Image: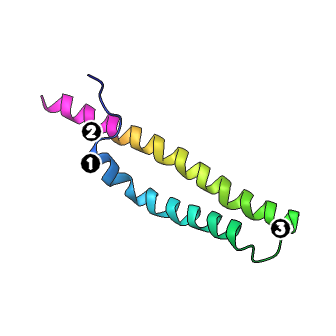
C-alpha cells in the first residue's frame, strides 16, 4: 500500500498557495485571450516571463512546503507514539 505524500490536512495548509497560483493562471489565460498591449514581442515576452516564472516558482515552493509539512507531521506522530 502506497502512502500519499499530501494528506487532507496538508492540502488544507497549502491552500494559502493554491489561491495565488489560481490568480496567476487566470492572468496568464487573460493575457493570452485578451492581449491588452497588442502583440509586441518584447512586452508580451516580458509579461509572460514575469507571470510564468512566478507561477512556476510558486508551484515548486508549494511542493517543497507540502513535503516539509508532511514530514514534520509524520515526525510528530512518531515522537508521540
- Do labels 1 and 2 touch, CB within 8 Å? yes
Q: Secondary structure at mark 2?
A: helix
Nearer the viewer's eye, disc 1 or disc 2? Answer: 1
Front in this rendered view, residue 1 or 74: 1
Tell me the quarter of the picture where residue 41 sits.
bottom right
The residue beneath circle 1 is 9
Tell me the quarter of the picture where residue 34 sits.
bottom right
Q: Check the picture and name the quadrant holding the N terminus.
A: top left
- For the residues marked 2 and 3, what is the alpha-carbon distance in whole angstroms? 45 Å
Specify the label residue 43 is tagged with: 3
Q: Secondary structure at mark 1?
A: helix
Name the residue at 20% across, 28% down: 78
Q: Earlier in the sequence, mark 1 or mark 2?
A: 1
Give the x, y percent position of residue 10.
Answer: 32, 46
How crowded pointer 1 is (Cα within 10 Å; few <14, some 14-19, many 20+) is rated as: few
Q: Which residues are magenta?
A: 70-81
Amino acid at each position: 500500500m502506497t502512502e500519499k505524500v499530501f494528506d487532507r490536512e496538508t492540502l488544507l495548509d497549502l491552500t494559502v498557495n493554491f489561491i495565488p497560483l489560481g490568480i496567476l493562471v487566470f492572468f496568464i489565460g487573460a493575457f493570452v485571450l485578451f492581449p491588452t498591449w497588442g502583440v509586441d514581442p518584447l512586452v508580451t515576452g516580458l509579461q509572460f516571463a514575469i507571470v510564468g516564472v512566478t507561477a512556476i516558482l510558486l508551484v515548486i515552493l508549494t511542493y517543497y512546503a507540502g513535503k516539509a509539512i508532511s514530514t514534520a507531521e509524520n515526525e510528530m506522530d512518531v515522537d508521540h507514539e
